[in-house]
Amino acid sequence: MTAYRPPKIAAHDITPEAIFMNRRSFVGAAVGGLLFASADSARAAALEASPSAFKVGEALTPEKDVTNYNNFYEFGLGKGDPAANSGDFQPTPWTVSVGGMVAKPKEFGLEDLLKFPLEERIYRMRCVEAWSMVIPWVGFPLASLLDKVEPLGSAKYVAFETVVRPEQMPGQSGYFQPLPWPYVEGLRLDEARHPLTILAVGLYGKTLLNQNGAPIRLVVPWKYGFKGIKSIVKITLTDKQPPSTWNIAAPNEYGFYANVNPAVDHPRWSQATENRIGEGGFFGGSRRDTLPFNGYADEVASLYAGMDLAKNF
Ligand SMILES: Nc1nc2c(c(=O)[nH]1)N[C@H]1C(S)=C(S)[C@@H](COP(=O)(O)O)O[C@H]1N2
Ligand SMILES: [Mo]
C-alpha cells in the first residue's frame, strides 16, 4: 500500500459527537436513488440501549474526512481518488447473491437488504497503513443475512466479492492494474456471525457514498480496514479459507486474519501507534497507541483462544 500522506485538517473542523447526535436526522430523502426508512427515534433509542462496544466514546472523525480520505483502488490509488473518480458509478439497482454451502441460496435486491432493521454503530476504523478514524455507520449484522440463507454445518468460512465494472471504475480500466479484480475477502464463519460484524449501507445517517463502498460494504471493526470489502455483489459460504486480495498481493505483509495487533509490526512500518485522521496536530492528525483488536479485545479475543497471533497475523 502507498505511504501515509497526512491531510491538512484544522482542529475546528472536528465535529464533536454531541453535535452529531443532536442534529442527526436519518434522511428519508433519496440519495443516489436510495432510501433509508427514517426511524430516527427508534434508532437513537437502540443505540442508547446497545452495548458500549457498539458506540465508541471517542470524537467522531469529521464526515468530510470519512468521505474524502479513502482507500478504494477500483477508483485509483490516491486518498482523494475514490471521491473524485466515482461519480459515474451506479449503486442502484443492485443485487447481492448469497450461496455456496447454504440450504437456501438467494439473490437479495438492495430493497430486500434495506428491510433488515438498520442500526447505528460507532466504530473505530484502523487501516493497516497506521491511520484511523471513528465512523458512525448505519447497517445491520451480517449474522441476520446469514440466518436467512441457513448455512450448512459443513460451512466454515464466508467469502466476499466486490463488483467488477471497468466502465464505471477507472482504476479497473487503465493500463496499470494495481490489483487483480474482483477484490475479494473472507472471514471465518464465527467471525462473520459475531455481533460486531455488520454490513453497512450508510454512515453519518446518510446513504453510503460511492467512495465508501456503496451500496453495501463489510465492516469488521477489530480487523485492519482492508478486510472491510466494498460494493459487495457476492457472498459464498465455503469449507475452505477464502482468498483475500491483499494477502494474495503480499502474503508476508497482509495475513488472512488481519486482526489489529500493535505487537506485530508490518514488515515496513510499526503498528504500535496510529494517526487519528482529523484531529489537528502538526501532521493533520494525532498520534495514539494502537489497541489490541482495535480496542475490541473484550468482545473478540476469545475467538482466537490458543492461536499464535504472531503466526496467524
Ligand atoms: N473493493 C475494495 N474494498 C476495499 C478497498 C479497496 O481498495 N477495494 N480498500 C480497503 C481498505 S485498505 C480500507 S482501509 C477500507 C477503507 O474504507 P473507507 O475508505 O470507507 O474508510 O476499505 C477497504 N475495502
Ligand atoms: Mo486499509
Image (spheres, rainbow, N blue to C red):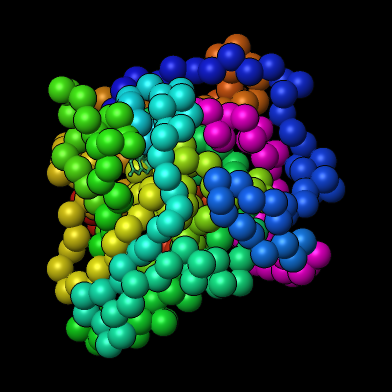
Q: Can residue 190 be spotted in the picture?
A: no
Residue 60 position (above or below residue 114)? above
Q: Write the residue at 41% across / 82% down.
A: 148
Task: State the image coordinates of residue 95 (x, y, percent, origin top left).
Answer: 37, 63
* Magenta highlight range: 41-69
Q: Is residue 63 magenta?
A: yes
Q: Quadrant of residue 225?
A: top left
Question: Can residue 153 be found in the magenta stretch?
Answer: no
Q: Quadrant of residue 74?
A: top left
- Percent x, y for residue 43? 72, 65
* Residue that extends furthest to the top in the rendered view of this protein: 282
Q: Position of residue 256 (x, y in %)?
A: 24, 52
Q: Residue at x 56, y 60 (%)?
A: 139
Front-most of residues 70 and 267: 70
* Quadrant of the rendering where the N terminus is positioned: top left
Which residue is painted at 74% across and 65% down in the image? Answer: 39
Which one is nearer the viewer's eye here, 298 or 70?
Answer: 70
Is residue 190 left or right of 51 when viewed as pictured? left
Q: Quadrant of ligand 1?
A: top left
Q: Is residue 49 above or below residue 247?
A: below
Front one among 94 and 134: 94
The answer, for residue 240, to whether it is visible in the render is yes
Tell whether 154 sits left or right of 65: left
x, y percent for residue 259: 36, 51
Q: Residue at x 44, y 49 (%)?
A: 91
